[in-house]
Image (cartoon, rainbow, N blue to C red):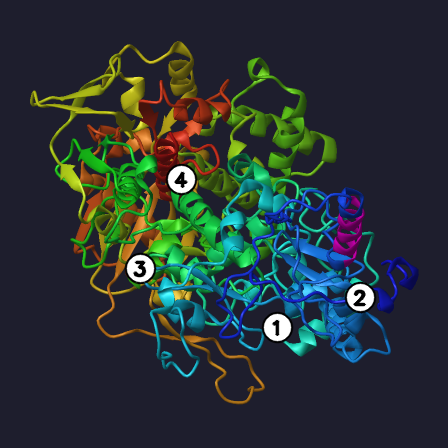
Amino acid sequence: MLSDADYPGNGSGARRAKRRSSGESAGDGQALRSSGRQTNVRVKRANNPPPGQSKRKATDTEEEDDQSEKKYRKCEKAGCSATYPVCFASASERCAKNGYTSRWYHLSCGEHFCNECFDHYYRSHKDGYETFAAWKKAWTSNGKTEPSLKAFMADQQLPYWVQCNKADCRKWRQLTKEIQLTPSLAATYRCGMKFNNVKSEGPDQCSQPEDLRVAEVTDSWWHSMLILPPLFKDSPATPFLAAYYPDCVGMSPSGSPGGAALSELRADHCRAVRPRSTCGSTSSSSWSSWSSFTFPLCPVAGLCPYFQPFYQPNECGKALCVRPDMMELDELYEFPEFSRDPTMYLALRNLILASWHTNCKEVLTVEKCVMQVVVRGLVRVRCVQEMERVLHFMTRKGLINTGVLAVQRALLPERHRAKNVIVIGAGAAGLAAARQLHNFGTQVLVLEARERIGGRVWDDTALGVAVGRGAQIVNGCVNNPVALMCEQMGVRMHKLGERCDLFQEGGRATDPAIDKRMDFHFNAILDVVSEWRKDKSQSQDTPLGEKVQELKKNFLQESGIQFSELEEKVLQFHLSNLEYACGSSLNQVSARSWDHNEFFAQFSGDHTLLTKGYATLLHKLAEGLDIRKKCPVTSVDYSGDVVRVTCSNGSQWTAKKVLVTVPLTLLQKNFIQFVPPLPDRKMKAVHSLGAGIIEKIALKFPYRFWDHKIQGADYFGHIPPTPDKRGMFTVFYDMDPQVCFVPARRRPPLPVPTRPRVRRAQGKQAVLMSVIAGDAVAAVRDMQDKDVAAECVKVLRELFKEQEVPEPLHFLVTHWSKDAWSQMSYSFVKMGGSGEAYDIIAEDLQGKLFFAGEATNRHFPQTVTGAYLSGVREASKMAAL
């Protein structure tokens, strides 16, 4: 901060000039003010000077110039257009107004304050000093940036600007100093409004011209002349970002930081942190914008706990999460003008994200966001202008206004709408893309080969509950778009508990200590695989199954440890679970790239079961879309200006862009003829991935025979009796898991521990679902359904040998390997392949042919979430092009 010697004395500002006609007039603050682009024009006399007075004329002119220099002073900011600055503060009795001052302090082109008003707040003997000191204390305790007097003026003294809400007006008006801007005022303001909501008598106030300075704000140079970035007051993002310094995430430290206790706590811990970098920097330093105190990651009150759009301090590795103090790479690419100082962008983006997650059931519009922008000065005009750009960008990227949202009007301007698009496939990826494009305002046609929509999502309710023949579990709900859609529809997700008892054939429960020990060894082996692959190329790859067995053998030889028979069986259970995750025998999976997606942030939080099934969500996505079923596509010709799509029934369709979302197997087997053929690079990537297959079986029983033994758990495991039985009915899920679990100790503790009891809910369904994975898939491929069911019941009778297991009333068995339009469950990286293949398959061709599906999502393969997000991604790409 500058010392007192840097500021001129008070006497220099004593000389004042008369108010010019362009100055602020009385009233409600709507009068015209100087635009800052005036020039000093002198009026020539009409008559010629008498003879002999030419010398006096020259002398008089010089004197006038000297007087003008004393009467007016330009802003010293290089490039400022204000020839005659006007002091907005009028705080000091000696305020220069629009006259002479020894120094003008520049906040923006059109907003200045004089040296006299500076002294009024800065000098300790002046009346305004206490006001500045109190503000400075609050700013220092909550914020990080310097509490300068310029920051005080911008935060506390600049007038608010508000836009008339009449559609045929929309002019900006300056409010008087005593009026505080609120979201409700911004939403209802009309020109000439009196703040008891009674309009003043007189001429139409909207006919009054707009302040000339407003037009300058739209110029590109205006933002570069802004001294301080805008910091919003009472932003909707405030409760989300209580752990951050407000001024590093686009919010004012003088606002409410989330409670006095939190404010004091932050202040106590932010003075002793490591050296801080500049706020808003794109540096990766984790110390740039928060204190060293670790704040609890509590969800915002009243908000879905799965909505966590912002990283909290010291957090990392959370999918679909943004740093509130830093721009992402795609944001920097879209808004390069904010790369030097991203504060304005961060303030807008954080406000938009917070507003969307506060209410995701309605379209978030520019109008709804603009009313939440509370910041003083002309910069509010600029923020409102930028709001539309930022909101459209975030809508296009699928960060807001997404999910199953139905819209009444197009979400994007016409320049972001493709003329028409054909989507091939009505699975999760195709429906996601179609819904997004439809909401953007694009004409979309969906062609589906089956008689139903959903693809590999297929719910069956024949057993009395929804059983997902395909997907039904959500792995990690925090920020998961499936959780968003459930929130939008009011669909309940059942949180799966962590308990999974392992039962041996014969009925014995496995000691949890053994399970824990073998789980440790299993993960240790995989950790060694991770170390092994660090310096291995694709040509040095090996099957994961072989590598696991090799490392296990080496470990036992080197350590001298010998696994017991039961421990070997438990290890086989964990290997079977890994084959379930990969969708294949481990002998087909790449040891080098089997978990390639783990290098990216993954979804965290609860794993849940959609008890109503995924189909509820997909049918909602499909509402209002033009979907043609039983239309298998046989060829796609993208050689011309438009893409021509031909179906097996002979029908042809054309579009500017086509999105292909068929399963990987259909691309591998050339079910669709592409003209010209797909590039060799893409086809090599297609064949480097494997088409994983798992099958499911569900059985309905007359009663819930398992309740007493598993005591309310959502699932239980089956220890394979021999390695060749690995993968056969590995885990059993309770498909109606709403157990009313009553703890035994509802009263004061008893001296002898008692077992908890389970009370069966009335009308509860008795349905178990199990999985067949790995080599076991081939073993059941050609079996009759009744024989597969008999084998499953046989296993259950072994697991519950101490009691009677009744015959199932009904059952269902899946056959994804024989499904004509899938022939697979989900993809995996084959030995010799790499995760890069997912990106290559996702590449568009000539800006006309696009690809989506779980096998195009490198970050989230094998999941409905990954398929959905790939559709959102491609819709965004089409809109950008």
Whole-angstrom CA distance, mark 1 to mark 4, is: 39 Å
Disc number placed over residue 167 in the picture, else none: 3
Q: Looking at the image, is mark 2 or mark 1 nearer the viewer?
A: 2
Q: Residue sitting at 53 percent across and 48 percent down? A: 216
| Front of the two marks 1 and 4 | 1
Residue kind at label 2, given as amino acid type: Gly
Question: Picture coordinates of residue 28 (x, y %)?
Answer: 49, 74
61 drawn magenta: yes
The kind of residue on which mark 4 rests is Gly
Query: Mark 2 highlights which residue?
Result: 13
Foreground label between 3 and 2: 2
Disc assigned to residue 24: none
Measure how far apart labels 2 and 4 are at the Cα level. 67 Å
Q: Which image quadrant is residue 111 in?
A: bottom right
Q: Which residues are magenta?
A: 58-70
Quick one: quadrant of the C terminus? top left
Mark 1, residue position = 256
Q: Nearer the viewer, mark 2 or mark 4?
A: 2
- The picture quadrant where one finds residue 513 is bottom right
